[in-house]
Structures are given as structure tokens and as C-alpha cells.
Image (spheres, grey):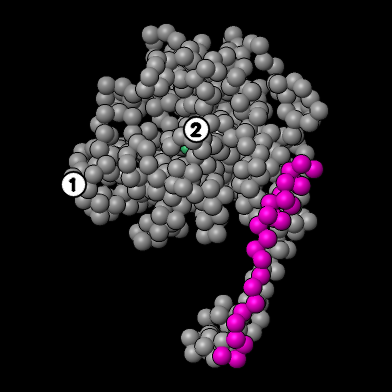
Amino acid sequence: MKPFFPTVKAIQYEGPGSKNPLALKWYNAEETIAGKKMKDWLRFSVAYWHTFKGSGSDPFGAATLLRPWNTGKDAMAAARNTLMASFEFAQKLGVDYYCFHDRDIAPEGATLKESNRNVDEIARLALRLQKDTGVKLLWNTANLFSHPRYMHGAATNPDAHVFAFAGAQVKKMLEVGKLLGAENYVFWGGREGYDTLLNTDMKRELDHLAAFLQMAVDYAKKIGFKAQFLIEPKPKEPTKHQYDFDAATVIGFLGAHGLDKHFKLNIECNHATLATHTFEHDLTVASDCGMLGSVDANRGDLLLGWDTDQFPLDVYSATLAMRVIVKQGGLGSGGLNFDAKVRRGSIDVEDLFIAHLGAMDAFAKGLRVAAKMMKDGALEGFIEGRYESYDFGLGARIESGKATLAELEAYVHKHGEPKRFSGRQELLENVLNQYLFG
Ligand code: XUL
Ligand code: CO
């Protein structure tokens, strides 16, 4: 078979001194950091929709990214070519995982039956390519937002007929996930949200969403599909108010509907920042609840208020993210999926490699720095010390739930005004910089 990336050979680790744009400088897959191979900490994944299906079109202009695998009138032939290109890409890049939506891998047909037939055919080819290459499926998902039928949502659509269509798509994708050994299954809320309360019964829509998720849990159990279920929060876009707003909202929703034991979260950087959180904030919220399952690694633009899905080349942010991941001992069955697209003007296929390599290196450097800081207790020592008054006496009684308001009052009468301590933010930022520069 003719390669789709003839100008690119298998990427090698050449170390920080390398000037080769098609080499890795910090990510050395087999190297052990903090007791685990880098590839096992990072579990990188390529996002099918951006890397192989992204066209570069925007509201102001037509497609700029014209790919050799996506051409031709025969949509199924293009789908087969795209799949083969994706495996060649992952192999040359040295990434073990990929992720897709149903409609990324196979074209939607005129009926559900035809769509399912298309998906089944491509899934069979994917199974063969997975076996041939060792590339694995980190997660799959159903696209419940592109087709016009979903303009008012999928599981939260006011029309039960649309709800049924969405359920049918998820059913098929759970079956495909099982066939391909997907390690996770993602629910990103697509158009689950609203634009105006003038036409929306929010409570009913949220109850329908919970019912939908419960059906998915039940069906996965029935067919023996053991993937970790993940919800991916996002606060806005496409709807003005997305129901899965941020990590805290999703965790509250899952708990309120008795679904929390079945789900973890897939935290995406650009979604966290759209919710006016930092990436590390939402990672920490999920991790503290034992619900950080996977990560969509990308970044937004501080000057733009939408989901720009840029490649995560910001080492500072990657380090703070890896700090959370190292602290919880890794992502388990999750990974770092590059839900990111090259800019509209980056039209060469080499740009796809360069973008991924930069992102892999940013997270590899972040892992190295975070692991070293953790080992040295560079920040942890300070943080522990900051809360030490809760380790004994009154603080310990507060933490164990034994203290009363009367006891607090007596304590203040006895001890008077508390001493004030510096938070030392600038000192700690300097410490972080020292590790990053070092
Ligand atoms: C949309 C987004 C999705 C999900 C999968 O903003 O991030 O691509 O990751 O549906
Ligand atoms: Co995403």
C-alpha cells in the first residue's frame, strides 16, 4: 500500500539538544520516570476528528487542509483510506492510542441501518489494523451533535424520537467499543444544554440525560463492555449553557442521579478555561473526588473566548497538569488525548507531526519536572506545613467532626487573635520556574 506520509520516517527520540523538527526532545517512551515508563504515565492518543478529518474551514472561509486520504466521491473508500492513514500516522509518531466518533470513521447513511453498516465495515478494518500495528483504542464516542436532527440536543432533546436516535447511535458505539477493546467510552455533551429558558424545561431535560446515561450503563453491562465511562465537561459552545458545565457540576449531577460509581471525567484544558477555570483546577476537582479518568490535552487562547483547540505547547500548564496526574499515580485506563487541531494555515502533513511532537514533548517535560518536584517535596512540604494546625488539638477535632461552635468560641476567648502567615505565592512561583529552567 502507498504510504500517506512518504516524507516522514518513524520518529526517534534525539534528546533536548536536537534541532530536528521531526524528532522528540523530551519524550523518551521507554525511559522510567518516578517508577513508570514515560509512555505509561502519558498514554498519548491521536484525535481522529481533528487530525484526519479536520478541514481548516471556519465561518469565514472554505477548507484549506486538503488531505490525500479524504479525497474522491466514494465516501467509504475515503473512510478506508483515512483509517489507514491514521494507523500509519500513529505508528510513525510512536503513539499507542487513538480516539474517534462514529461519524469520523464512517459516513452517515440515509438510514440508521445504512449508517450502522458503514460503521461496522470500518470497525472490522480497524480491528485488523489494531492487531497488525499494536495501536489501541483509548476511547470511542457517538457524534450526537453534527446532524441537524440534534439541533435541540440529543438526550436532552424535547422530542423523544430524537432521544431514541441518539440512544441507537450510542448502542452501536458501545458494541463497536467492545469489538475494538476500547479502554474508555466518552460522553461529551454535544448540544446537551440550552440557549433560552423561554423554551426549555431544564429539570426534565436533566432527568432525561440521567435516564440516557443509565441506559448506556445497563447496555454496556449486558454486552460485557468493561470500558471506563467518562463524561467530558464543557461550559458553553455550541449551546450558550452546556449542562456538563465543569467538573464540579458534572460530579454533582452524577451524584444526584446515583450515577457517580459508573463514571469518571475526561477533563479538557480548553473546556476548563472556557469555564473560567485553569486546566489544573478542573483536573484537581476531578482528582480529589477520585474521578479523574482521562484528559483531552489542548489549550485555548487567552485573548479568544471560544474553543480554539490548539496543540498544548505551553510547558508551564503541562507541568501543572502533570503534577495532578503524578500525584494520583497516573490516569489508569485513561490517557492524554490530543483533542487539538493545527491552524488553518498549517497545511502540510508534516505540520500534523510537528504539532503532535511539540505537545508530546511539552507533557514529557511537564512529567519530568512534576515528578522531580514531587520527589523533592518542593511544594508539598510547604502545603503540608500550611495546614499543620489541623494535625493536632483543635484542628484535629475540627477535621474529625468532633468540634462544636461553643468549643471554637472558648478557644478564641483563650487564645485571642490568630497569628498571620504569608502564603508565599511569589516564592513558590520562583521555585516552579527554577525547576522548569533547570
Ligand atoms: C468538543 C470536544 C469533543 C469531545 C468528543 O469540544 O472536545 O471533540 O472531545 O466528543
Ligand atoms: Co474533547
Q: Amino acid at mark 2?
A: Asp
Magenta includes 281? no
Q: Residues within 10 Å of mark 2 (few under 14, many from 20)?
A: many
- Can you say which quadrant of the picture contains the C terminus? top right
Location of residue 174 by image quarter = top left
x and y percent of residue 387 in the render? 64, 71
Give the alpha-carbon distance from disc 1 to disc 2, as whole Å.
31 Å
Location of residue 241 by image quarter = top left
Disc 2 Cβ-to-ligand 1 distance below 8 Å: yes
Q: Nearer the viewer, residue 294 or 339?
A: 339
Residue drawn where x is 41% and y is 30% of the image: 102
x and y percent of residue 322 in the render? 64, 46
At mark 1, the secondary structure is helix
Q: Which residue is labeled 2 in the image?
A: 309
**First to last magenta residue range:** 413-438
Q: Which mark is residue 198?
A: 1
